[in-house]
Image (cartoon, coloured by chain):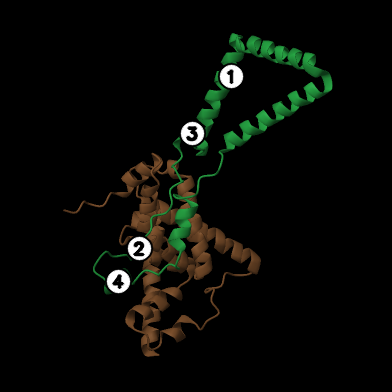
Amino acid sequence: MYSDAYDPLDEAIAGLPLEEPPAGLRASILLATAYRPAPLFSLGEYVAMGAIAAIALWLIALVVMGGATLFVHTIETIAGTSARTLSNGATLAWLAAGGATALWISLFTGFQPAAVLPKRSQPPPRR
Amino acid sequence: MTTAPEDDGALVARALRGNPDAFATLVERYDRAVYHLAYRTLQDSEEARDATQEAFFKAFRSLRTFKIGSKFSTWIFAITYHACCDRLNRRKRYAGSELPERADPSPGPEDQAIALDDARRLRAAVDALPEKYRTVITLFHLQGKQYEEIAEVLGLPLGTVKTHLFRAKEQLRKLLGEMEVS
């Protein structure tokens, strides 16, 4: 039924000109991909800033409500608890396991950590 | 002295290392062909434009899943084809009936073809083909006789692609013959 022999129709099809894309298509693709303007902050930075702001708000509330004594007591409690937690081998092992799992899952989901993402801050070339 | 153009695999590797110019070169190399495939499949310039953007955006987002050693053209055409299929399915859902053979309300290709030159007549005949044949002919146009790659893009067995191509050409000959007579 099917033959690879010379067919003038094949030649005619191959000779058809490609459709002309609309003006600005390439620029819009490049602006959405390779030359996408870098966001002001990465997701991780937003999360970190939010956490810092929440902690700051909490500490300010402590100072306002209980004065310096409660503030110092709270800071000491946080520091003590953190030190105890991070000196516990089992906790560190769980943290390492969690981090390794997250990294492993990211290999399958296509999620790219900020460090390996292409830089997008450069403007598109002028042609 | 001119340097040989960098092959697609090397450009993908450079893009993955964070070089935006490498991906831009791939866009410059394939945007016209991708738009052509989208336009021929969807027969609507606005939708083809959106499908082209969507295809490159998806390719950029999932560049890490591209298998180094395979052909970038086949990969991007497959992404484009799937984007077009999604749009055709949506169109079908909203229309609630059979897909229209053509999206444009303009006169049929046969009418348009009268007094056109050979290339325009052939294009009008391709437009008049059913969607599955039109796509296979468009990919044959873009990729030549690389039947395995056409099959990969469409997700069809090689034999089916060859059969579709054979029937598409048969219909094309018939349409071109009718245009000749009219």
* Residue for badge 2: B142
Tint of chain A: green
Name the N-terminal-most of marks 4 and 1.
4
The residue tagged 3 is: A107
Label 2 neighbour load within 10 Å: few <14, some 14-19, many 20+: many
Q: Are the numbered discs 1 and 2 placed on the same chain, yes or no?
A: no
Question: Is A85 rendered above or below residue A46?
Answer: above
Parent chain of label 3: A
Which numbered circle lies on residue A95?
A: 1
Residue A7: percent from left, percent from top: 26, 71
* Of the two numbered discs 3 and 1 in the rendering, the one whose residue sits closer to the viewer: 1
Disc number for residue A15:
4
Q: Secondary structure under badge 1?
A: helix
In this image, A111 relative to B143: left or right? right
Q: Residue furthest right?
A: A65
Q: Is residue A85 above or below residue B12?
A: above
Q: Earlier in the sequence, mark 3 or mark 4?
A: 4
The type of residue carrying mark 1 is Leu
Name the kind of residue labelled 4 in the image: Gly
Q: Chain of mark 2?
A: B
Left or right: B116 in relation to A94: left
Residue drawn at point x = 34 percent, y = 83 percent: B117
Q: Residue at x 50, y 39 (%)?
A: A110
Q: Amino acid at mark 2?
A: Leu
Q: CA distance from mark 4 to mark 2?
A: 10 Å
Whole-angstrom CA distance, mark 2 to mark 3, is 33 Å
Q: Residue A89 occupies which quadrant of the picture?
A: top right
> From mark 4 to mark 1, how far is it between C-alphas?
61 Å
Taking the view exactly as shown, the residue that stands out farthest to the left is B1
Dot in front, 1 or 2: 1
